[in-house]
Image (cartoon, rainbow, N blue to C red):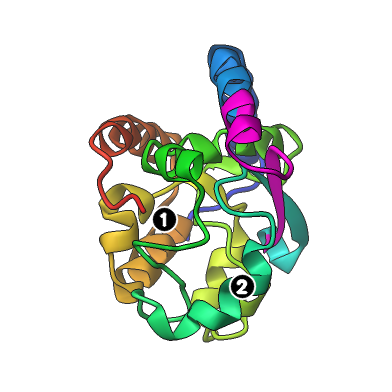
Amino acid sequence: PVNRTGWRAVAKRAFDIVGATAGLALTSPVWLATAVAIKLDSKGPVLFRQVRVGKDAEPFEVLKFRSMVPDAEALLDDLRDLNEADGPLFKLADDPRMTRVGRIIRKLSIDEIPQLWNVLRGQMSLVGPRPALPEETEAWDELLTQRLRVKPGITGMWQVSGRSDASFEDYTRLDLYYVDNWSLATDLAILAKTVPVVALRQGAR
């Protein structure tokens, strides 16, 4: 595995700070437009906050633009039998909890933009494994737990390789490959691949 200490850790953090700061500046008009659209479309907060598992299994509160009804998590148990993903992940293409604006911002991945604040806070990285829910990690084996050696990312190998269309086996393999073989060049390559994936809405639900 790649050693992430010393100058590599400093370089990774500097890369995240510069990238997140630039991203927040560039997307500021999107923040305003999205906030207004969410408020006009449905009652509830603009931002959705949810506990995820970070580096070294430390919990943190991830930020997203709200794309579902306010009581979406309370309704999840009624939908589990309709799950279209394998493994501990939950995906439903036609999720009835989604709002009209929510479907649009999900398709365009706009709902993920507030996570740039998580990056600035040091809870996430621009590139890394997907931030998992606590209940998902309970189903992981010892091997998959190795992904918690690094910060979760806004985008990553799994996200640019099909996202919702990729299998749980792919999810495991790609995330663990990234953990063991990280480099700044890899991060740049993944960020470059993220642009067409988002633009073409590949695997987005």
* Residue 86 visible: yes
Give the residues in magenta. Answer: 35-53
Label 1 Cα crowd, 10 Å radius (few <14 / some 14-19 / many 20+): many
The numbered dot on residue 71 is: none
Question: At which x and y percent is residue 166?
Answer: 28, 64
| Secondary structure category for the residue under label 1 | helix
The numbered dot on residue 178 is: 1
Left or right side of 204 for 5: right
**Quarter of the rendering containing residue 193:** top left
Number of labels in the image equals 2
Q: Is residue 106 above or below residue 136?
A: above
The numbered dot on residue 75 is: 2
Q: Is residue 55 above or below residue 65?
A: below
Q: Is residue 72 above or below residue 200?
A: below
Q: Amino acid at mark 1?
A: Tyr
Q: Residue at the location (37% across, 67% down)?
A: 171
Label 2 Cα crowd, 10 Å radius (few <14 / some 14-19 / many 20+): few
Q: Amino acid at mark 2?
A: Leu
* Residue 7 visible: no
Q: Residue at the location (48% across, 58% down)?
A: 179
**Quarter of the rendering containing residue 10:** top right
Q: CA distance from mark 1 to mark 2?
A: 34 Å
Taking the magenta stretch, the answer to whether it contains residue 129 is no
Q: Residue at the location (36% across, 54% down)?
A: 205
| Secondary structure category for the residue under label 2 | helix
Question: At which x and y percent is residue 111?
Answer: 53, 40
Q: Is residue 154 above or below residue 93?
A: above
